[in-house]
Image (cartoon, rainbow, N blue to C red):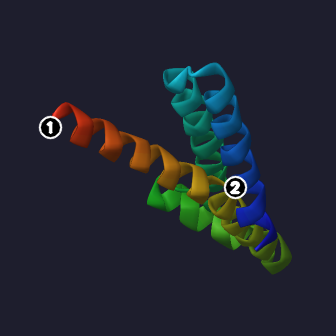
Amino acid sequence: MRYIGIGLIGTLLALIYGFFTQRWETTVQIIGWFALVPLLLAGLLAGVFVSGDRNRANYHSGDKETRKARGSWTVRFLLIGAPNAVCVLLFVVIAVVQNGGF
């Protein structure tokens, strides 16, 4: 729950910035970065950017504690990025609805 809170704090700070400056494009970009960076880090730790052979070799060459720690950090980064990704998707849906479609 702590990591979702960290993600929500980033989202709220960007939204506060947007309310005070009325620069919503910049606000969406900030929230997008708050979503993209943790999700990319989670992908790196999970090994989704390597081939199956390399992933299997990494699995067998590492010890159980390291795999468990990487899995734990993967979940943490996913939880940090999730609220921001949801907020960006909401902004996209709102923009599409207001403009009458794509």
Q: Quadrant of the C terminus?
A: top left
- Answer with the quarter of the image where residue 26 lies: top right
Q: Residue at x 67, y 56 (%)?
A: 45
Amino acid carrying label 1: it is Gly
Q: Is residue 50 visible?
A: no
* Residue depicted at x 64% and y 38%: 15
Task: Locate residue 80, reporting x and y percent.
Answer: 69, 57
Front-most of residues 37 and 55: 37
Q: Is 92 left, or right, of 97 in this rendering?
A: right
Measured Cα–Cα span from mark 1 to mark 2: 28 Å
Give the labeled residue for mark 2: 8
The picture places residue 1, in percent across and down from the top left corner, at: 76, 74
Q: Which residue appears at 49% of the width and 60% of the height?
A: 53
Q: Position of residue 88 (x, y in %)?
A: 47, 44
Q: Is residue 70 visible?
A: yes
Identify which residue is drawn at 70% across, 36% down.
16
Give the SS element for disc 2. Answer: helix
- The type of residue carrying mark 2 is Leu
Q: How many marks?
A: 2
> SS for tag 1?
loop
Q: Is residue 46 above or below residue 1?
A: above
> Which residue does the numbered mark 1 point to in the structure image?
101
Q: Which image quadrant for residue 22?
A: top right
